[in-house]
Image: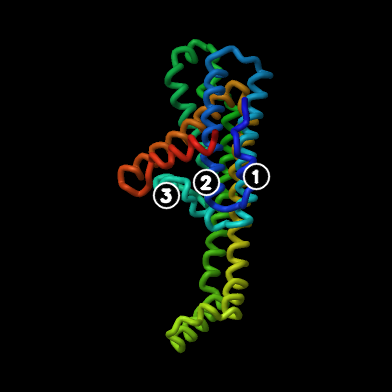
């Protein structure tokens, strides 16, 4: 599997939102390549060792994404929470800058149900299908317990975000907004913008807000990655291949559909997005 060109160059450049946009498009292009290899592993006779190596590579690809995201977030967490590289449809379903961890279990159970129905006759005959429709009772019990823990952790992070959002109206923010508003009313020439002391005070007040957001985003991303790794660890190699295929297909298709919807509505140029994807990842 070849590395996606320019990803590491992008990371080493100035860590700005537009660079992460390029990184994201290149990362998606590589995910699409991984999907092709996963589909090959599903249809061909890969050994367990070959499948494990592929699974390790694909999960490592997700790890690389979150490590890069963490580095970019240290420079500008706000743009990471309002990503311009995602469609408006995707953004509407984001949870703290990414997918909701508990969604991974819905994906698992949905794909399991579809594969179970498709291979029902074989399963009734006692044949093993070795896909997600063939989950054992012990696997289902582990997933049930893991899902409960994940939902609890989600709620803790959601509550943490709620508490942090409320600090936008804390005493320091309200007092500062009043002071600046009074100065603006007293001086209508706009020279308030050149008051370095006030600007420094505004900056020092906002910095903790952004640092808090960065910490919460980090916790959310850690839970996302931990959930993915835990699910894969419970599945057999063949089942993990099926799960990673379903995850990649869902991610790629939702992104594609959302971009097309935005293009039709005039919110974003789909042709430009495709151009960025193809040109910056060569």
Q: Which residue has dot 3 on it? A: 92
**Which residue appears at 62% of the width and 23% of the height?**
236
Contact between labelled residues 3 and 2, with CB atoms less than 8 Å apart: no
Instruction: Give 154 or 127, whichever is nearer the viewer.
Output: 154
Query: Residue 250: x, y in percent?
Result: 46, 34
Does residue 190 sit above or below 23 in this rendering?
below
As helix, strand or loop, the secondary structure at mark 1 comes to helix
Mark 3 crowdedness (10 Å alpha carbons): few <14, some 14-19, many ≥20:
few
Q: Name the quarter where the C terminus is drawn.
A: top right
CA gap, disc 2 to disc 1? 15 Å
As helix, strand or loop, the secondary structure at mark 2 comes to helix
Mark 2 crowdedness (10 Å alpha carbons): few <14, some 14-19, many ≥20:
some
CA gap, disc 1 to disc 3? 24 Å
Q: Residue 21 — which label?
A: 2
Q: Which residue has dot 1 on it? A: 67
CA gap, disc 2 to disc 3? 18 Å
Q: Is tag 1's residue or tag 3's residue first in the polypeptide sequence?
A: 1
Query: Residue 27: x, y in percent?
Result: 56, 37
- Position of 30 with respect to 56 (left or right) is left
In this rendering, the label closer to the viewer, 2 or 1: 2
Mark 1 crowdedness (10 Å alpha carbons): few <14, some 14-19, many ≥20:
some
In this rendering, the label closer to the viewer, 2 or 3: 2
> Which quarter of the picture shows residue 226?
top right
Does residue 57 sit above or below 227 in this rendering?
above
In this rendering, the label closer to the viewer, 1 or 3: 1
Does residue 180 sit above or below 82 in this rendering?
below
Instruction: Give 170 or 25, whichever is nearer the viewer.
Output: 25
């Amino acid at each position: 599997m070849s590395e996606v060109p320019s990803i590491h160059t992008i990371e080493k450049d100035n860590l700005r939102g537009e660079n992460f946009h390029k990184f994201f498009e290149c990362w998606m292009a590589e995910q699409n390549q991984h999907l092709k290899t996963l589909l090959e592993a599903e249809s061909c006779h890969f050994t367990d060792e070959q499948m494990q190596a592929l699974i390790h590579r694909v999960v490592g690809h997700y790890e690389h994404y979150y490590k890069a995201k963490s580095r970019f977030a240290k420079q500008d967490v706000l743009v990471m929470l309002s990503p311009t590289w995602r469609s408006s449809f995707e953004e509407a379903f984001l949870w703290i800058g990414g997918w909701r961890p508990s969604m991974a279990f819905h994906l698992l159970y949905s794909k399991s149900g579809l594969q179970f129905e498709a291979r029902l006759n074989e399963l009734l005959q006692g044949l093993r299908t070795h896909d997600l429709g063939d989950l054992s009772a012990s696997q289902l019990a582990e997933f049930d317990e893991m899902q409960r823990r994940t939902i609890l952790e989600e709620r803790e992070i959601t509550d943490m975000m709620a508490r942090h959002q409320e600090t936008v109206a804390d005493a320091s923010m309200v007092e500062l907004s009043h002071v600046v508003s009074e100065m603006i009313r007293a001086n209508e020439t706009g020279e308030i913008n050149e008051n370095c002391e006030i600007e420094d005070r505004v900056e020092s007040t906002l910095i903790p807000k952004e640092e808090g957001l960065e910490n919460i985003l980090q916790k959310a991303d850690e839970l996302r990655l931990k959930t993915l790794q835990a699910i894969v660890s419970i599945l057999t190699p063949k089942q993990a291949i099926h799960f990673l295929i379903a995850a990649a297909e869902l991610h790629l298709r939702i992104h594609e559909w959302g971009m097309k919807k935005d293009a039709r509505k005039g919110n974003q140029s789909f042709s430009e997005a495709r151009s960025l994807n193809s040109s910056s990842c060569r």
